Image (tube, rainbow, N blue to C red):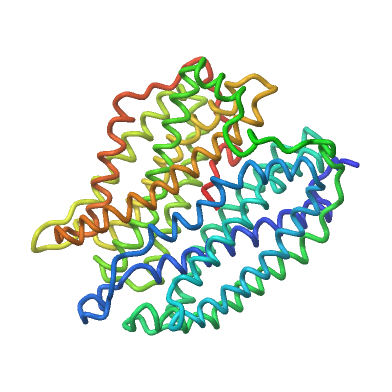
Amino acid sequence: MKSDSLATRSFVGFLVTQFFGAFNDNLFKQLLLLLAVPSAAAIAAGQAKGPDLQGIATVVFGLPFVFAGGLAGFWADKFNKRTIIIGSKMAEIVVMALGMIAFWAVPYVGFYGLWAVLFLMGLQSTFFGPGKYGILPEMLEKRQLPRANGLVLMTTFVAIIIGTAAAGPLKDALVDPDIPGVRAAQKLWIGSFVCIGIAILGTISSLFIARVPVADPDLKLKAEYLTVPKPMRRLLLDDKPLLWALLASCVFWLIAGLTIQAVNSLGKTQLGLSDTNTSLMVSLISVGIAIGGVVAGWLTRKTSARTVLHIGCWGVVLFCVLLAITVPGRGHLLGFPGSIPALMLLGASAAFFAIPIQVFLQSRPPDELKGRMIAVMNQANFIAIVGSGVLYQIMDLVISQADLPRSSVFAAMAVLFVPVAIVYRLDDSDDAVPSGPDGIPETAV
């Protein structure tokens, strides 16, 4: 039976469960990204060996979303979503326990164990996602859904910010910043107890979620669930504004994937910051996205979605350029203090760009294809995120060979985004952008 109130044990349990899931994902992922970046001190001492490995981590985490996203959606409709959520949370405990073993075993097997755990973590999140988003309409009355989604998005952003920001202090507390990556990684096995504890708490809270009916128990698995369904291919080919919006969304997520890696590299390698301050810089992007989402909703009531999108486009280009500038003999133009507002404004600009496109992609298709459009959008976005990992590794090689500053990645991001800012025009027939937290796009958790 659907609830007409959000103040129920079931919804609160759901909210707590997804909060802990987003927190753990971002804590563990940021710990690995920080390990993958050589510090300025290690480079100066000649202890850093090999390239920046953040691109590999990004690819490994994103691949399950690309290849298993369709199957996860099928499972969410075929089986009970509460069961899938609880099963996913129990799997998270196992994955985090394997993470502890992988950290301890780094001196013996290298980073391969951690990459395997990161892949399993992405796989667990892939199957958790459809249950997480699909259970709300089955749990709550329709009139409660806007508020419920707003609360989910806000708590998710809080979890992303806290989880990302907490990774740096946790690593600094357990690891001497001057020791090389292999020895540093092994010391983090103790920190894995935090991740295991969070996973256990999330599993306990998931038990409070009420059982819901199975959406389609007779659903049969088809090959097209693993790719782009034929009706969606036909729709995208016939509706060029929809296709261009999807491609623009992919470029955005390519840049978004590069941004986190670029900020970690800028903070640790070029500015010589601690892991704590580097994680703070990354988390401020999400703060900017959250604020920008609210402001974009308000601005859209005063002007058009196309205008908001173009403010966002050129804002992304501007702040990428500012973050890219390194003055010979003087170092990074903004430094740590100046990068803080620039990163928040970059996040806000990203929200200005992403929200109109996301709403357009959700509202443009006919009702019977909206759900599959969202699935295709998510799959395309994760292909772009995986692509950002590959592109970052290429950029890292070029930067290392040419002895360029790490901030050069931001210059490349600006160059990639300029054609979108110049050429792309959002179709004005769908201008509605939700205000408040409902309009905030969720990052790739």
Q: Which is nearer the eye, 321 or 295?
A: 321
Please say if 430 is above or below 281. Answer: above
- Residue for point 27% across, 68% down: 269
Where's the N terminus, which quadrant? top right
Furthest residue to the front? Answer: 223
Q: Which one is nearer the viewer's eye here, 399 or 283?
A: 399
Residue occupying image coordinates x 67% and y 52%: 128
Up/down of 48 relative to 231, above or below: below
Q: Position of residue 84 (x, y in %)?
A: 76, 53
Residue 213 x %, y %: 87, 42
For the view shown, which residue lies furthest in the right direction?
1
Picture residue at 78% right of the left edge, 66% below the top: 204
Task: Point out residue 283 in the picture as x, y percentages from the top left corner.
Answer: 45, 58
Say which residue appears at 47% left-offset and 52% top-offset.
Answer: 287
Residue 145 image position (x, y, % from top left): 73, 37
Q: In the drawing, does residue 71 fall left or right of residue 318?
A: right
